[in-house]
């Protein structure tokens, strides 16, 4: 099996190639999706140079953070956030990608320690209106953005989406395109907007062609789960 450094270098090369192919000169960041991975696996990838890790579950992430407290890592919550976990999320994460309702925004703001930098937030958009998926309707973006802007302990950074994976590539392209349009519109209103998080292992190169600035990759980095 390739080493963590080899997998990381190979993936970064693919990201850079896709960015250049899209005619872009900006940077696309890599978020390593470490859900269900061990603290040792994260440590190995961090040793290869990866610093940003995404977790789905608050309690699982807190345990890993404790085991890796000697490392300087950036922790992202990318899974659905239940209101009763907002306190812990606000205290233990650097980013939350799954903001989709005002009650969660207010809870995160209330529980974010004043001693820490503002909590970076992405509004999750259910771009394909899937009943089984979290996220707000596209028309609710402005309301949620305005709510985030009211809180000094929060910082609105952009949008996140998970388009329907079963879509034909052209249908997925349409979803990515609509997210890109929403991102550009939001960025015209808020100066802090710089992140469009979309694209995973199967479609991140296409997402980059539609303006993704952050891609979320798991298996290609860590290898198949045992």
Image: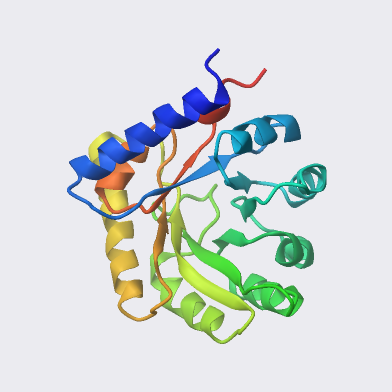
User: Quarter holding the C terminus?
Assistant: top right
Q: Residue at x 78, y 50 (%)?
A: 62
Q: Is residue 136 something one can see in this rendering?
A: yes
Q: Position of residue 2 (x, y in %)?
A: 52, 16
Instruction: Work out whether 137 lies above or below 72.
Output: below
Task: Using the image, determine if residue 32 lies above or below residue 24.
Answer: above
Location of the N terminus (image quadrant): top right
Q: Position of residue 154 (x, y in %)?
A: 60, 76
Would residue 172 be seen by someone viewing this image from the given angle?
A: no
Furthest-top residue in view?
Answer: 1
Where residue 119 appears, x then y in whole percent? 62, 70
**Dividing the picture into quarters, in which one does residue 125 lie?**
bottom left
Q: Vertical placement of 6 versus 23: above or below?
A: above
Q: Please give the name of the residue rendered at 39% of the width and 55% of the height, measured from the top-left corner.
A: 127
> What colouring does the structure picture have?
rainbow
Describe residue 155's horizontal placement relative to residue 88 as left or right: left
**Residue drawn at 28 percent across, 34 percent down:** 168
Marks counted in the figure total 0
Q: Is residue 65 left or right of residue 178?
A: right
Residue 133, x across and y down, in percent: 53, 49
Horizontal side of 215 relative to 223 (left or right) equals: left
Q: Is residue 173 depicted above or below 95 in this figure?
A: above
Q: Quadrant of residue 35?
A: top right
Nearer to us in this view, 38 or 144:
38
């Amino acid at each position: 099996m390739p080493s963590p450094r080899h997998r990381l270098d190979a993936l970064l090369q693919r990201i850079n190639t896709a960015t250049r192919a899209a005619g872009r000169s900006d940077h696309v960041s890599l978020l390593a999706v470490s859900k269900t991975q061990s603290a040792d696996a994260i440590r190995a990838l961090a040793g290869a140079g990866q610093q940003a890790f995404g977790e789905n579950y608050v309690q699982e992430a807190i345990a890993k953070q404790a085991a890796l407290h000697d490392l300087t890592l950036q922790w992202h919550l990318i899974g659905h956030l239940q209101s009763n976990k907002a306190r812990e999320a606000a205290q233990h994460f650097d980013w939350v990608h799954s903001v989709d309702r005002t009650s969660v925004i207010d809870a995160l703001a209330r529980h974010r320690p004043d001693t820490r930098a503002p909590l970076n937030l992405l509004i999750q958009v259910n771009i394909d209106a899937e009943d089984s998926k979290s996220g707000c309707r596209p028309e609710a973006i402005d309301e949620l953005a305005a709510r985030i802007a009211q809180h000094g302990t929060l910082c609105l950074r952009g949008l996140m989406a998970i388009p329907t994976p079963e879509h034909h590539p052209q249908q997925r392209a349409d979803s990515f395109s609509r997210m890109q349009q929403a991102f550009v519109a939001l960025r015209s209103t808020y100066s802090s907007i710089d992140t469009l998080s979309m694209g995973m292992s199967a479609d991140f190169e296409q997402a980059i062609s539609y303006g993704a600035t952050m891609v979320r990759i798991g298996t290609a980095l860590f290898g198949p789960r045992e």
